[in-house]
Amino acid sequence: MNQYISSSAELGANVQIGVNAVILDRVRIGAKSLIGNNVVIHPGSVIGESVRIDDNTVIGKLPLSSPRSIFKVPTGLKPASIGAFCQIGANVVIYAQCEIGQRNLIADLATIRENVSIGDLNIIGRNVAIENYVSIGSRNKFETNCYITAYSTIEDYCFVAPCVATSNDNYMARDPERFKHFKGVTLKRGARIGVNATILPGKVLEQDACVAGGAVVSRDVPASKIVLGSPARELRDVPEAQLLRNNLDRP
């Protein structure tokens, strides 16, 4: 079978590796993992046991930087780390210094940048983009085509619907003052965002906050309140039946 496995790589028992896979120096892969065709795993990356990585995925990629970029590629990035029992789809790119916990599902075409930490049991949907310097807790759902901007914090049990856009630069790349104010979004425990909503830089969605589909959030959203419109305004309380405390025993 045509594949490259470095002599310094460590493979656990019953690991399966597909055609044209490239496993580079000091990579560690846990037992019973399944590595698809054309997968590239960069040096030092750690893959837990019983992980599935589908065709054409790249693990541990180093970031690029344009001469015009205001932030340059950091040096000394640590290898990527992926916890046990994760499922990673086809054509996914996971960068260096990305720490992913256990039992996450990362669907086809997703991108997870460097300096990202992700907890356990998250669902990261098809073509989701998670930028750098993002912290994500556990049991969140990020649905198809949503975008999580750099410098964001997502706690636990949050829901981000398809095509949600978040942002971190109120100056839209002009005025040096912007360098002092970069800030992504913050979703507190149980916050939810509806389809095609836009969250402006630095905004905080408090616990159990709910943003209606298509809303443009230009101010913080109070706990357990529903907001809608452009700009988003408070509508009413989140129904009791939808509060997180009444749904913790559900999938």
Image (cartoon, helix red, strand yellow):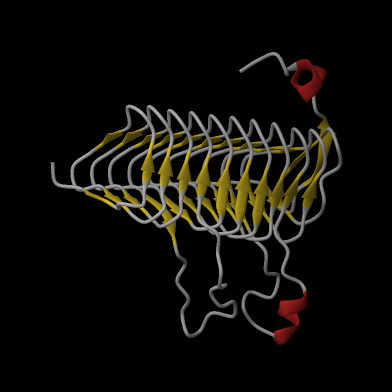
Q: Quadrant of residue 212?
A: top right
Give 70 or 194, whichever is nearer the viewer. Answer: 70
Pinpoint residue 211: horizontal percent, then vertical percent: 71, 40
Pick out the residue farthest to the front. Answer: 7
Q: Is residue 170 left or right of residue 221?
A: left
Residue in view at x 80 percent, y 28 percent: 238
Pinpoint residue 202: horizontal percent, then vertical percent: 76, 59
Task: Give the answer, above or below, for where 54 lies relative to 220.
Answer: above
Q: Is residue 151 left or right of residue 54?
A: right
Task: Give the answer, above or below, for where 175 lies relative to 196.
Answer: below
Residue in view at x 66 percent, y 34 percent: 138
Task: Give the answer, above or below, for where 189 lies relative to 181.
Answer: above
Pinpoint residue 186: horizontal percent, then vertical percent: 75, 50
Residue in view at x 37 percent, y 27 percent: 32
Pick out the residue farthest to the top. Answer: 249
Q: Quadrant of residue 222?
A: top right
Give 61 or 148, whichever is nearer the viewer. Answer: 61
Callout count? 0
Pick out the residue farthest to the left. Answer: 1
| Quadrant (top left/top right/bottom left/bottom right) for the C terminus | top right
Pinpoint residue 151: horizontal percent, then vertical percent: 68, 60
Residue in view at x 39 percent, y 43 percent: 10
| Quadrant (top left/top right/bottom left/bottom right) for the N terminus | top left
Q: Quadrant of residue 166?
A: bottom right
